[in-house]
Amino acid sequence: QVQLVESGGGLVLPGGSLRLSCVASTSTFVIGPVAWYRQAPGEQRESVARLSSAGRAYYASFVEGRFTISRDTAKNTLYLQMDNLKPDDTAVYYCNKDARIAARMNSWGQGTQVTVSS
C-alpha cells in the first residue's frame, strides 16, 4: 500500500502563493496518472488538478491559470504550485491517483490545510 504525505499548507493572504508537496512511499505513484484534490468543510472532495503519465496537465476551471501541477520522479514527489490564492481555495488538500482513470485509489493521506484569509 502506497503511503502519501502531503505538506506545504498554511495561512496565506488573498493573492498569496503556496507550494504543496506530496511525497509517495514508492516510485511508481508519481509517474501517474495522479491528481490533487481538496475538501472544504461541509463539502465533498473535489479534483483540482490532474497530471497524466505523459505529463499533460488538466485543471478544474476554478483554478485554471492560477495553479500548476508538476512532479519530480527522482524524489517521488508531486507538487501543486498555487498562486493568486482566494478565500474560496481554503480547504484540506490531498494527493492520490487520478480517480477518472484509477481502478482503485490509494489510501488517503492526512492532507495539508490551506487557509486563505485576510
Image: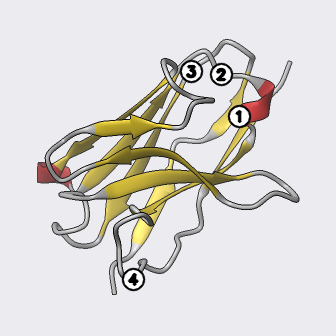
Q: Which of the numbered marks, if any, corresponds to residue 89?
A: 1
Quarter of the picture holding the C terminus:
top right
Instruction: Give the secondary structure at mark 4.
Output: loop
Q: Earlier in the sequence, mark 4 or mark 1?
A: 1
Q: Earlier in the sequence, mark 3 or mark 2?
A: 3
The local crowd at label 1, few if under 14, some if 14 to 19, many if 20 or more residues have their Cα within 10 Å, is: many
Instruction: Give the secondary structure at mark 1.
Output: helix
Q: Given contact means CB atoms under 8 Å apart, are the residues at marks 4 and 3 in contact?
A: no
Label 4 vs label 1, nearer the camera = 4
Q: Amino acid at mark 1?
A: Asp
Q: Which residue is mark 3?
A: 17
Q: Earlier in the sequence, mark 2 or mark 4?
A: 2
Q: Which residue is mark 4?
A: 104
* Side of 29 relative to 114 (left or right): left
Disc 3 and disc 2: Cα gap in Å?
6 Å
Quarter of the picture holding the N terminus:
bottom left
Disc 2 and disc 4: Cα gap in Å?
31 Å
Label 1 vs label 3, nearer the camera = 1
At x 54%, y 19%, the residue is 83
Q: In the rendering, at what x and y percent does residue 110 appear?
A: 59, 67
The local crowd at label 3, few if under 14, some if 14 to 19, many if 20 or more residues have their Cα within 10 Å, is: some
Label 2 vs label 4, nearer the camera = 4
Is residue 84 positioned above or below 90 on the image?
Answer: above
Q: Given contact means CB atoms under 8 Å apart, are the residues at marks 4 and 1 in contact?
A: no
At x 44%, y 66%, the residue is 99
**Residue 41 quadrant:** bottom right
Q: Given contact means CB atoms under 8 Å apart, are the residues at marks 3 and 2 in contact?
A: yes
Q: In the rendering, at what x and y percent does residue 116 appear?
A: 76, 29
Q: Amino acid at mark 3?
A: Ser
The local crowd at label 2, few if under 14, some if 14 to 19, many if 20 or more residues have their Cα within 10 Å, is: many
